[in-house]
Image (tube, rainbow, N blue to C red):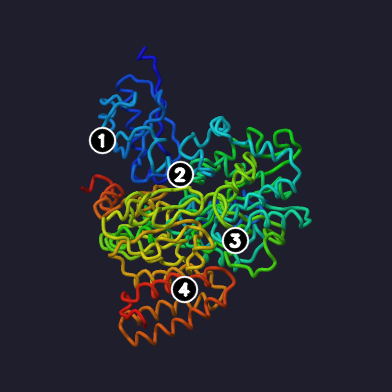
Amino acid sequence: MGNDSTRIAAIADKHRSRPGATLPILHDIQAEYGYIPDEAVPIVAETLNLSRAEIHGVITFYADFRTTPPGRHIVQVCRGEACQAKGGEALEEHAKKKLGVDFHETTADQNVTLEPVFCLGNCGCSPSVRVGDEILGRVDAERFNELLDELRGKEQR
Amino acid sequence: MIANESYKVYVPCDTTAASVGADRVAGRLIDEAQQRGISLQIVRNGSRGMFWLEPLVEVVTEQGRVAYGPVRPADVASLFEADFLRGGSHALQLGLTSEIPYLKNQERLTFARVGLIDPLSISDYEAYGGFVGLRKAIDMPPNGIVAAVKGSGLRGRGGAAFPTGIKWQTVLDTAADQKYIVCNADEGDSGTFADRMLMEGDPYCLIEGMIIAGLGVGATIGYIYLRSEYPRCWTILNEAIAYARAANFLGENILGSGRHFELEVRLGAGAYICGEETALLESLEGKRGEVRAKPPLPAVSGLFGKPTVVNNVITLASVPIILSCGPEFYHDYGLGRSRGTLTLQLAGNIKYPGLIEKAFGMTLKELLYDYGGGSASGRPIRAVQAGGPLGAYVPAKDFDMPIDYEAFMERGAMVGHGGIVAFDDSVDMLKMARFAMEFCVEESCGKCTPCRIGSVRGVEVIDKIAAGKERSEKVEGFGGLWGTMKDGFLCAMGGMTPFPVVSALKHFPEDFGLGPNE
């Protein structure tokens, strides 16, 4: 705990003098932990001389910031209209069924968190899926299954 | 002689090209060349914007750049066998890239360099006319720069189509100790990717446009507010800014002019509403992205309460050519009050999706059939959604209308950021209408009640229509809801969300179980 507080404080401190530093700090904390731990809220608030309510308000406003640890991989399925025009809805259903989870949920083995996303800007090769910083285009059920195999590692085949 | 020869091959680093395997193709090319003892230089360019051909590999030959695509990693060995490095024939060979009609028939001004150059090479950028506009602007008085942008007729390409020069004039005329240039790179509309392509394929063009804007209005700090869904843009922009700073295009005393301009990229966090300029400013200030009431206009009191230019990526990236070739040059493209070129993005159920930059005035039909080749499924195109998730659905009978701001507005549609998403006749318009309302439920910032609550009610009303309960009455009720949302909002989100729904109801009543006159 104490160790984490020091790390979080160091991250926050790095951005202290930047105008409007809240988002850059929260992004860095999430990059480090995978989510925003509760204990970060008072630390960020104090660093920026803001109230805890204000920091909490920012964290809960933005879809990117999560307050619980995600699975090892975050898989985002695009729900934009351009993806829907090419079978995106069927892909959403397939993803949910295959993983046995709904959007915003994590598989029991903690491997995959499934999220919706509204447009990855890959509309020319829809439907699209994002895993980490990788974006995949022309994804059908088969390609999605291959992706899950890759994420699970080859040993389980 | 052959052993010493070095070949130059272009493989795009663009998100879409990579999403269908361009990185793996580049890797295979390197391995295969090594095995064959061939010296190969691979340049990772932007995309040419012909997405059905991605990954598009280009080889530099004496005749020009020869294209091959779509190339899969498994095709690489056969390309070498076919002597593709000298433009050899192969099933995937497409001839000279510049002669492909899709590309050849375009009028690329803002996208002139995208796909042509190494995005991070300043010498490439300058070899193709880069920084000419900036060098001219440095010798001009601020009023002259603003006058040039006004004279070009450029209007905001983000969607609102407000005259850019007038916005700049307001910022220039407002006295302040600090002013800002903010680039809105929160390209959230589904079916749009022009901003992304430009930032990945020609980032210095945006940077140059922002510096010129700074010189024009007297701003010394710029921010690019980038959506977090664009990880490749984040990397490329940050590298480009570092190189531009090292070459003294950014920072103190730019090119010895005594002027300075600092630039930084800030990452959004997955909120569509932050593409609305005042919500974007709130977010940049580190707050929840809730919209502000206007006035005051951001041009008078924007970021941190200071006069701020907020422009879209394509708007700012159109500025360098206006300065380098002159406002008349740009103004000569287009028609009526829509001057210059529009970067259209063709997506969804379409055979040839991609980016098409043309002067205003092409009809939807030309775009969908001459460029797009009809639907990908081979079935008739039933409707297109123009201008993003808040844009109207346009039925096939209206495909003859020219693509310009005013013509679209006359028919209750909007050009917006230029995204056109095609749907074939398997589309269920009631579902699409419901999705538009559901999207608003998800993405409303919550500040205005008609938008926050109205969107939830909208979903309920559509569900009731779907269930067949008192259809006509519900549709009428929806009219009242629409009125409330349209009148009781601060930003376009609440005011425009009913557009896709109302257009779907109007043009496709049969999908709602209604007769044509109900």
Upstream in sequence: badge 3 or badge 4: 3
Judge by depth and name the residue closer to the eye, A32 or B216.
Answer: B216
Q: Is residue A6 visible?
A: no
Q: Which chain contains the residue that carries disc 3?
A: B
Which quarter of the figure is the N terminus of chain B placed in?
top left
**Three-letter code for the amino acid on which mark 4 is drawn:** Pro
Upstream in sequence: badge 4 or badge 1: 1
Q: CA distance from mark 2 to mark 3?
A: 30 Å
Q: Secondary structure at mark 3?
A: helix
The answer to whether A45 is drawn above or below residue A122 in the figure is: below
Residue B498 is tagged as 4
Q: CA distance from mark 3 to mark 1?
A: 46 Å
Q: Which residue does the numbered mark 1 point to in the structure image?
A: B74
Q: Which residue does the numbered mark 2 point to in the structure image?
A: B106
**Three-letter code for the amino acid on which mark 1 is drawn:** Ala
Residue B277 is tagged as 3
- Residue B330 percent coordinates (x, y): 59, 46
Q: CA distance from mark 4 to mark 2?
A: 34 Å
Tell me the quarter of the picture where residue B470 sits. Answer: bottom left
Q: Which chain contains the residue that carries disc 1?
A: B
Asked if disc 1 and disc 2 are in contact, CB closer than 8 Å, the reply is no
Asked if disc 2 and disc 3 are in contact, CB closer than 8 Å, the reply is no
Q: CA distance from mark 1 to mark 2?
A: 32 Å
Judge by depth and name the residue closer to the eye, B305 or A69.
Answer: B305
Q: Which chain contains the residue that carries disc 4?
A: B
